[in-house]
Amino acid sequence: MNAENKIKTAFDSVGASESLKAATKSFLQEARRKEERRAAGHRLRMAAQAVCAAVLMLVIGLGGYTMLLVPVSYVSIDVNPSIELELNRIDRVISARAYNEDGERILECISVWGKHYTEALDLLVESSEMEPYLEGNAALVFTVASDSMQRENWLLEGVSGSSGCTGYGGMGVRTDVAIVSEAHECGLSLGKYAAYKLLLQYDSSISTEDCRNMTMSEIHGLLEEHGHKSEGHGSGGCRGDGTGGASGADEGREEGWGGEGNGSGHGHGHGHGR
């Protein structure tokens, strides 16, 4: 008999009592149950981690949406073309809308989505499409509104320092963000609507339709006829050497035309602010 058969025969002769067999079976069953419980617990922990990760991604996603796609500020550019930019919390353009046909023609040729607002202003104002509207006695007005006074100050300073403003004798003014929806309901840009509200103080017969069909230079002329000197709180002029900034920022918000800069580009502080 070879060695392999001897070993098999020896093991075959080993017996076990029924109690030992039962104990072994019980031990194996308990070990299996413990393993199944550990596996179930592991799956539960993995599922919980997956849920937490999904919730975290949702929160981050909502935060990113709020940061990047929700408008908190508005800047309108009005000459005869009326264009309004919506800005997110990092001052990037998330929407550019035209409020007349001249503005539509400009936006058909120039995309400013995702750009910093000062870059967008320069692209629009310095474009060949805008050039014909800036000749002669054209009045270029930038109107800003935001969810905080501090942000408005930043925006107005950025506008006043932009080459699109300093290079074309522009004027930077502020207005109340609460009138944005009113302006849009009337089919006017924020800047045109603010100018309309200011003109309405002098002439109750003026309508939004009248202002829609007028250039900012024409509106400015009507205001001057009524003795308004185009000076206001918290306005930034862009004439002269282009060093204009926001002045009178904490005195009030101007619903309409702000200060026209003097030689150093600073607006004056006595207008019809509210």
Image (tube, rainbow, N blue to C red):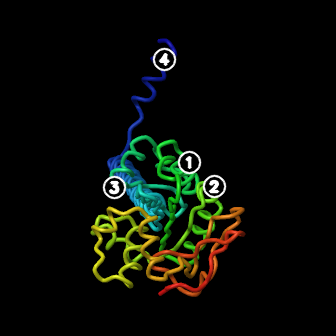
The reply to whether discs 1 and 2 touch (Cβ–Cβ < 8 Å) is yes
232 lies left or right of 226: right
| Disc assigned to residue 167 | 2
Q: Quadrant of residue 150?
A: bottom right
Closer to the chain start, of discs 3 and 4, is 4
Front-lying residue, 64 or 30: 64
Q: Is residue 134 visible?
A: yes
Q: Which residue is mark 4?
A: 4
- Mark 4–mark 1 distance (CA, rounded to whole Å): 97 Å
Q: Residue furthest top?
A: 1
50 lies left or right of 166: left
Q: Amino acid at mark 3?
A: Asn
Q: Which residue is mark 1?
A: 126
Q: Residue at x 42, y 46 (%)?
A: 106
Q: Amino acid at mark 4?
A: Glu
- Mark 4–mark 2 distance (CA, rounded to whole Å): 102 Å
